[in-house]
Image (cartoon, rainbow, N blue to C red):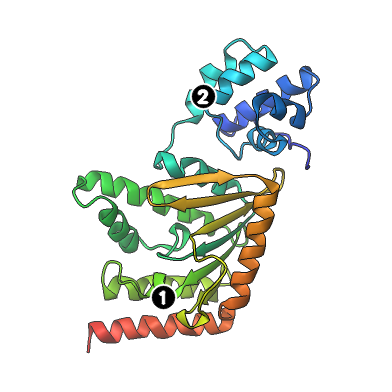
Amino acid sequence: MPGPKDLDPSSSPRALLGAELRHAREKAGLSQEELGHRLYVSGSFIGQLEAGTRRMQPEYARMLDDVLGTEDFFQRNCAAVAKSRYPERFAEAAEAEAEATAIRQYAPLLIPGLLQTPAYAQAVNRAYDPTGPEEVITEWVEGRMARTRLLDHPTKPLLWVVLDEAALRRQTGGRTVMAKSLRHIAGLVRRNRVIVQVLPFSAGAHAAMEGAIKLMDFDDAPPLVYLEGVRTGRLEDDPAVVAQLRLTFAFLTASALSPEKSLAWIEALAQDYLHEEHP
């Protein structure tokens, strides 16, 4: 397991808490695996807390205070870490995403958040909450667009996405919104900022028919996978599960169109949407 990095405590509440956890653990003479055993979690999970890639939850804060003899330090301070602009089910994954050096994702039903345009995100969030106040929808869209700024860096993180044809055929927001969304994706590909492959209907049955996958790698913490469903989501760090889903993603890339053919496919579909909008 990689050793914990030296965190800058001023960088974020999670970084501060991670640095303090590492200090308290080492002072107690415990390895990550030994501390994890006492909390009924993996050593990898402890490493992710120390690296700041996972958020400390209140139940773990209480257990850490008990095991490490830190009175109520972690309980008092984990509240600052819990503040997020994202829905609770996705908040921890979004925070981990921001620290990732590589993200590999299969999107079966919609264009993933990092590749969305504001209009597409507006349509998606309005569909999620048809009667929600406009200011709430706007806040959600702003949060999603804030995530896309990860791609402002010229090379990090590596983003490799397999898009199911279903995600690109569903007219989310209408034809014009879809055309602009596909052109946005094509632009990112042409700037060599992302790798995108299309998994066409003609590929038939494939290895991930049960749902979406997001694999995340980090410089100084074990990898994670995020699994999501309707109004649910969870992070998984079990090495066996992560390894299996890495293999699943490899199968998907083998079944999908090549990046070059995928780009041509996306640009052609964008043109089709425009022509249908303006016959």
Q: Is residue 267 left or right of residue 129?
A: right
Residue under the point 65% across and 25% down: 39
Residue under the point 55% across and 56% down: 214
Mark 1, residue position: 183
Q: Residues within 10 Å of mark 1 (few under 14, many from 20)?
A: some
Q: Picture coordinates of residue 25 (x, y %)?
A: 73, 22
Q: Picture coordinates of residue 142 (x, y %)?
A: 35, 49
Mark 2, residue position: 58
Seen as rendered, the residue at the extreme bottom is: 279
Q: Picture coordinates of residue 41 (x, y %)?
A: 65, 32
Residue under the point 42% across and 71% down: 184
Residue under the point 54% across and 84% down: 261
What kind of element bears circle 2? helix
Q: Residue 133: name its quadrant.
A: top left
Q: Picture coordinates of residue 139 (x, y %)?
A: 31, 45
Earlier along the polypeptide chain: callout 2 or callout 1?
Answer: 2
Quadrant location of the N terminus in the rendered image: top right
What kind of element bears circle 1? helix
For residue 65, the mark is none
Q: Is residue 117 left or right of residue 39?
A: left
> Can you see residue 9?
no
Quadrant location of the C terminus in the rendered image: bottom left
Above or below residue 21? Residue 230 is below
Residue type at mark 1 is Arg
Q: Nearer the viewer, residue 108 or 138?
A: 108
